[in-house]
Image (spheres, rainbow, N blue to C red):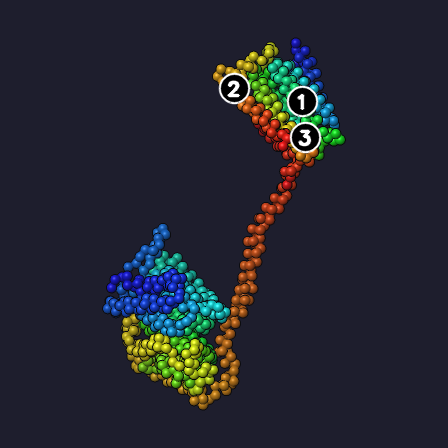
């Protein structure tokens, strides 16, 4: 396979972006659907090339393909190279990103039909896909960071796609700023690593970390810094507040960026840097604890939301926590010595990324389903839905499959990946296992609450069925261009668990992918089933009144629905009080009085001294004459005295 | 008492100082010009004295050129004074302070 | 001979100083101009005591004959009968400065050893002056020519300045 193939994979979407921005948008905007075709063509080609790369990687020894590096920038003795890493991790990620991006673009053609920003949408989608692919393929931290920021930018542009809506603009800014905080930690970590090791290259850093050359507090701080970038990007606690608000963007955007790919970049980063994390016990414990906590934390908030997309957003945060948990507990096992290092490195990546793989499919599908429901009913509010299983059978079927997979019911894909995580958690960190198990229950409950409220019962909304051919929502199934990708995703959500992804990613350990070898599988199935049953009881058959429960547990309900008041904490206390009134006010004072004061002072001083000195210019001839002769006299005296 | 170089030089200094005072202290522009002439003459005396007591004719040559320049200067100066007088009706130097701040 | 020179010098010196003082201190401009003429004459006399005969005659021709006349014309053309020649606002600083200057110069002059060659007879200097000016190897011809150009420029300039528009 020529070495230009991975480069082509990530350059094609960029090319699509350039063509749309510079050719179509200015000159051919009346034929906006060309943008969609170009994007789909580019990403489709990338997907085909990714399949080729996958095939090659499967055959290669150790699943690693060596790629040449290009010298990019030379400053004195330092040379920064641009290289591409193609190993099993990269190959899997390529498939996920290109595949789901392709399906989402096809779906978007239907969803965004008629929108005035159609070309802009596809331009940004292309740019995003290109950046994400670049992030996955980058072989050194510098370029990874560049593409990291690139995806952050595209997230901002796409969340705020309908920028004339104030809520969307605010949400975009919030997303960008909150992830920025994490990115700052990431950048500091990169610089720290560079200053201590002199290299950005990931392979070299791994060697140094594993050899123990790079160790101790440096490694821990660097790892925590890198993880803080992941916390921001993957919306883990405490930087989780941006993701629910990011639902202001178009639904395909939420499906692609905030479910399947961009938020997974954080998990990918931890997986990519796993040897470093595994070498530092504090760092990997931090990963596991934050992951586990976030999982249950977000699940509690998803219980009470009234907006479909918000529920699914909290579900995303929770599942990302699962992935971090998976990576973390294996690392803890390595650090404690329970798992040998070579095994642990592959196992950790396998556990976390396998769940990323399956999650991408069913979560994207959940979002696309929500979009389809919105297309029909014009709303995302659960209280105005119901009974849609009759009007939208395809949407119902695919959404149901995705939900079952999310809960982790055998034989769908979610079961296998969740199994892996729960098993590892049981083996290495029991406390987190308990949290994870509780989260399974909560997950089942909230997603099936959505299922029953949306598709079960009778329709509670305001849209008339069969609105004729008029624009606007009508209660019927979405067009084929939207349903087809959903079906493809549903198939993948079903079968992805059976693919030997784990082995491909490096899990050679026994006991893995033999799901029914321990009781954990049964326990999680039971817990999940109980959650589904409870949801049915409240929202399906209505044996228990949800209203009554809410009133009984009102304070808890308020806690959840107000998102633990974190938004208020961040905004009112932290931003306004601490930063704005405190630190920034100090800076403002400094800027106004010291900096400006200095400059204005110099200017004012010059003016003042000028107006004082100008009085010397009396215009009186004789005054000047006296001054001249006085000077001459002084010179003469000096000459007389000193020589 | 024989008259030596110092006498001439002191005379030159006295005349120069008188001219200096007049140039700096009088208000009539013509009088200022007159005092400048006195100063130039004083300098000429000094030069010629040096020429006489040093036995070198350069001093007198210099004095001739000073006289030439002085004459030209008086002509121009008086022309300027007359031009100013025509437009301002005054020859008071304290009133011609257009270069004031 | 020496005593004649001495007496001549002292008389001429006193008169020149007195007339200069009169120029500066008199209120009436015209009288001041007349005393200026007297001063010029005495300076010519001093030139003669210094055996610079050509210079003395040139002094009278130029200064008395031309410069003084010019000044008197200017006085007549710029008559400010009431004001005359009063003292300006800088008389005190000017006085201090002039006195200081005088004292400095006198001290310098009397304190310096001048290496004067003694006992040289007085002789007329006109021919030697001419020879110095128009020497064979150039002499002072160039400054001479430049002086001529200067006079031309002054001439034209003065005419232009006082033209009636």
Compare residues A427 and A464 and report the one nearer the observer. Answer: A464
Which residue in the structure is indicated by mark 2? C141
Near mark 2 (Cα within 10 A), the count class, few <14, some 14-19 or many ≥20, is some
Q: At numbered mark 1, what does the secondary structure look like: helix, strand or loop?
A: helix
Which residue in the structure is indicated by mark 1? C69
From this view, report whether residue A272 is shown above or below residue A446. above
Determine the CA span between mark 2 and mark 3. Answer: 35 Å
CB atoms of marks 2 and 3 within 8 Å: no
Query: Within the image, what quadrant is residue A227 found in?
Result: bottom left
Residue A100 in view of the camera? no
Query: Within the image, what quadrant is residue A502 found in?
Result: bottom left
Compare residues A575 and B77 and report the one nearer the observer. Answer: B77
Determine the CA span between mark 3 and mark 1. Answer: 16 Å
Q: Pointer 1 indicates a residue of which chain?
A: C
Which residue in the structure is indicated by mark 3? B29
The picture places residue A428, in percent across and down from the top left corner, at 36, 75
Q: Pointer 3 indicates a residue of which chain?
A: B
Near mark 3 (Cα within 10 A), the count class, few <14, some 14-19 or many ≥20, is many
Residue occupying image coordinates x 54% and y 61%? A584
Image depth: mark 1 or mark 2 in front: 1
Near mark 1 (Cα within 10 A), the count class, few <14, some 14-19 or many ≥20, is some
Residue occupying image coordinates x 49% and y 70%? A165
Q: At numbered mark 2, what does the secondary structure look like: helix, strand or loop?
A: helix
Compare residues A347 and A242 and report the one nearer the observer. Answer: A242
Q: At numbered mark 3, what does the secondary structure look like: helix, strand or loop?
A: helix
Query: Within the image, what quadrant is residue A29 found in?
Result: bottom left
Determine the CA span between mark 1 and mark 2. Answer: 29 Å
Mark with earlier residue (1, 2): 1
């Amino acid at each position: 396979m020529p070495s230009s193939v991975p480069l082509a994979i990530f350059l094609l979407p960029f090319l699509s972006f350039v063509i749309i921005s510079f050719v179509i948008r200015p000159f051919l905007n009346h034929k906006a659907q060309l943008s969609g075709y170009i994007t789909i063509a580019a990403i489709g080609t990338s997907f085909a090339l990714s399949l080729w790369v996958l095939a090659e990687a499967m055959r290669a020894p150790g699943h690693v393909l060596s790629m040449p590096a290009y010298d990019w920038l030379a400053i004195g003795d330092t040379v920064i190279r641009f290289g591409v890493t193609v190993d099993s991790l990269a190959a899997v990620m390529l498939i996920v990103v290109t595949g789901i991006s392709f399906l989402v673009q096809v779906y978007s053609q239907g969803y965004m039909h008629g929108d005035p920003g159609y070309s802009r949408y596809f331009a940004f989608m292309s740019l995003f896909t290109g950046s994400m692919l670049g992030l996955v393929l980058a072989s050194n931290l510098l370029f990874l960071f560049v593409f990291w920021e690139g995806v952050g930018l595209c997230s901002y542009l796409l969340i705020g796609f309908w920028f004339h809506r104030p809520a969307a603009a605010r949400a975009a800014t919030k997303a960008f700023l909150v992830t920025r905080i994490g990115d700052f930690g990431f950048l500091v970590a990169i610089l720290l690593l560079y200053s201590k090791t002199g290299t950005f290259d990931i392979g070299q850093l791994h060697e140094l970390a594993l050899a123990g050359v790079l160790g101790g507090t440096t490694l821990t701080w660097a790892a925590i810094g890198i993880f803080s970038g992941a916390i921001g990007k993957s919306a883990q606690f405490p930087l989780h507040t941006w993701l629910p608000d990011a639902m202001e963007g178009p639904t395909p955007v939420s499906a692609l960026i905030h479910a399947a790919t961009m938020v997974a970049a954080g998990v990918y980063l931890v997986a990519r840097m796993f040897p470093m994390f595994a070498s530092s016990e504090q760092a990997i414990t931090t990963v596991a604890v934050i992951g586990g906590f976030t999982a249950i934390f977000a699940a509690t908030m998803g219980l009470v939301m009234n907006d479909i997309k918000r529920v699914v957003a909290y579900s995303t945060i929770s599942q990302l926590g699962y992935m971090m948990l998976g990576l973390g507990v294996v690392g803890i096992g390595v650090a404690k010595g329970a798992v040998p290092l070579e095994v642990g490195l592959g196992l950790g990546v396998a556990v976390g990324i396998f769940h990323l793989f399956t999650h991408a499919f069913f979560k994207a599908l959940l979002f696309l389903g929500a979009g389809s429901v919105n297309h029909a009913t014009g709303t995302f509010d659960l209280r105005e839905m119901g009974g849609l299983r009759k009007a939208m059978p395809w949407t119902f079927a695919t959404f149901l499959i995705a939900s079952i997979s999310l809960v982790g019911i055998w034989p769908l894909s979610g079961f296998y990946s969740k199994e892996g995580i729960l098993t590892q958690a049981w083996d290495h960190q029991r406390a987190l296992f308990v949290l994870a198990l509780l989260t399974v229950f909560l997950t089942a409950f909230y997603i099936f609450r959505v299922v029953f409220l949306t598709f079960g019962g009778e329709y509670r909304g305001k849209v008339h069925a069969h609105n004729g051919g008029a624009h606007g929502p009508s209660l019927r199934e979405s067009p084929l261009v939207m349903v087809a990708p959903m079906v493809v995703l549903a198939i993948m959500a079903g079968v992805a668990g059976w693919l030997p992804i784990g082995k491909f990613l490096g899990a050679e350990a026994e006991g893995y992918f033999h799901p029914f070898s321990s009781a954990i599988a049964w326990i999680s199935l039971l817990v999940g089933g109980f959650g589904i049953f409870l949801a049915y009881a409240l929202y399906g058959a209505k044996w228990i009144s949800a209203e009554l429960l809410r009133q009984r547990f009102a304070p808890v309900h308020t806690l959840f629905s107000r998102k633990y008041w974190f938004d208020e904490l961040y905004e009112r206390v932290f931003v306004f009080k601490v930063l704005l009134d405190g630190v920034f006010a100090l800076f403002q004072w400094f800027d106004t009085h010291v900096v400006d004061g200095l400059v204005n002072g110099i200017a004012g001083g010059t003016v003042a001294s000028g107006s004082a000195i100008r009085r010397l210019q009396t215009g009186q001839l004789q005054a000047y004459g006296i001054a001249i002769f006085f000077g001459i006299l002084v010179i003469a005296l000096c000459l007389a005295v000193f020589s | 008492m024989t008259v030596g170089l110092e006498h001439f030089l002191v005379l030159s200094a006295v005349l120069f100082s008188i001219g200096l005072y007049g140039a700096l202290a009088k208000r009539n522009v013509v009088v200022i010009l007159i005092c400048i002439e006195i100063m130039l003459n004083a300098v000429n005396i000094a030069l010629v004295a040096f020429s006489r007591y040093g036995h070198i004719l350069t001093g007198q040559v210099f004095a001739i050129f000073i006289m030439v320049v002085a004459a030209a200067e008086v002509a121009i100066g008086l022309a300027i004074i007359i031009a100013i007088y025509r437009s301002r009706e005054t020859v008071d130097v304290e009133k011609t302070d257009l270069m004031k701040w | 001979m020496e005593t004649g020179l001495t007496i001549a010098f002292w008389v001429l010196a006193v008169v020149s100083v007195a007339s200069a003082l009169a120029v500066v201190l008199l209120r009436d401009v015209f009288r001041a101009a007349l005393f200026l003429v007297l001063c010029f004459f005495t300076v010519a006399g001093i030139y003669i005591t210094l055996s610079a005969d050509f210079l003395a005659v040139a002094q009278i021709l130029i200064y008395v004959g031309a410069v003084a006349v010019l000044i008197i014309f200017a006085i007549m053309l710029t008559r400010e009968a009431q004001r005359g020649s009063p003292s300006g606002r800088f008389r005190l600083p000017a006085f201090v400065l002039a006195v200081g200057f005088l004292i400095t110069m006198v001290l310098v002059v009397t304190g310096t050893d001048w290496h004067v060659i003694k006992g040289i007879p007085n002789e007329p200097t006109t021919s030697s002056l001419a020879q110095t000016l128009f020497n064979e190897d150039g002499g002072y011809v160039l400054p001479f020519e430049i002086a001529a150009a200067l006079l031309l420029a002054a001439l034209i300039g003065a005419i232009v300045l006082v033209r009636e528009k």
